[in-house]
Amino acid sequence: MQKTYMAKKEDAGATFAREWYVVDATDQPLGRLASKLATVLQGKHKPTYTPHFDVGDYVVVINADRVKLTGKKWDQKVYYRHSGYIGHLKEIPYRTLRARHPALPVRLAVRRMLPKNKLGRRMLRKLKIYSGPDHPHQAQTPQPLEL
């Protein structure tokens, strides 16, 4: 009978070799792109995936301002945040958010698909998002990731 692999702290050096990937977000649907990125950041694409360790890879997203939304989401999609005080629920439409911060919708979509704990916050740090086609991570020689 085959046993399920579970990574241990002692294996951390050799087992958790991190790769760098670059993804072009031009004309990619936002939700589908975010789910693929969340899978790679968590390490679920590797046979050494372990839920309680961060075994994922680094991902560089370029052209994040050219991500695609389907239907009427340009006008109907709304992002909410709350300060914690009564009546302080803020809402911002997608069109306004994209005009102010072009890369933020991609980051928010990926963040909400990761675990909601310390491990998820650590995984999100491995996501690098840029609005244009240039990025400062050439030295890591990222491989293109097809989605």
Image (tube, rainbow, N blue to C red):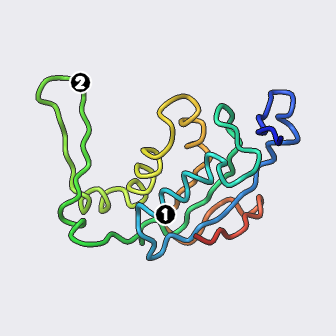
Residue 141 drawn at (x, y percent) = 77, 64
Q: Quadrant of residue 14?
A: top right
Locate the C terminus and report the quarter of the image it occupies: bottom right
Residue at (43% x, 57% y) in the render: 106
Vertical relation: 116 (above or below) 48: above
Residue 24 drawn at (x, y percent) = 56, 71
Q: Which of these two is toward me, 43 or 83?
A: 43
Left or right: 68 as drawn, with respect to 125: left
Q: Which residue is mark 1?
A: 33
Residue 93 drawn at (x, y percent) = 21, 56
Left or right: 23 as drawn, with respect to 144: left
Q: Which of these two is toward me, 51 or 27?
A: 51
Q: Which mark is residue 116?
A: none
Q: Are marks 1 and 2 in contact (CB under 8 Å)?
A: no
Residue at (42% x, 72% y) in the render: 66
Q: Which residue is mark 2?
A: 84
**Amino acid type for the residue under numbered disc 2:** Gly
Vertical relation: 5 (above or below) 41: above
Q: Residues within 10 Å of mark 2 (few under 14, many from 20)?
A: few
The extreme top residue here reads 85
Could you say whether the residue bearing mark 1 is in a helix, strand or loop? helix
Locate the N terminus and report the quarter of the image it occupies: top right
Q: Quadrant of residue 62?
A: bottom right
Q: Residues within 10 Å of mark 1 (few under 14, many from 20)?
A: many
Could you say whether the residue bearing mark 2 is in a helix, strand or loop? loop
- Which comes before the other along the chain, label 1 or label 2? 1
So how many labels did they put on this image?
A: 2
Residue 25 drawn at (x, y percent) = 50, 70
Residue at (51% x, 29% y) in the render: 117
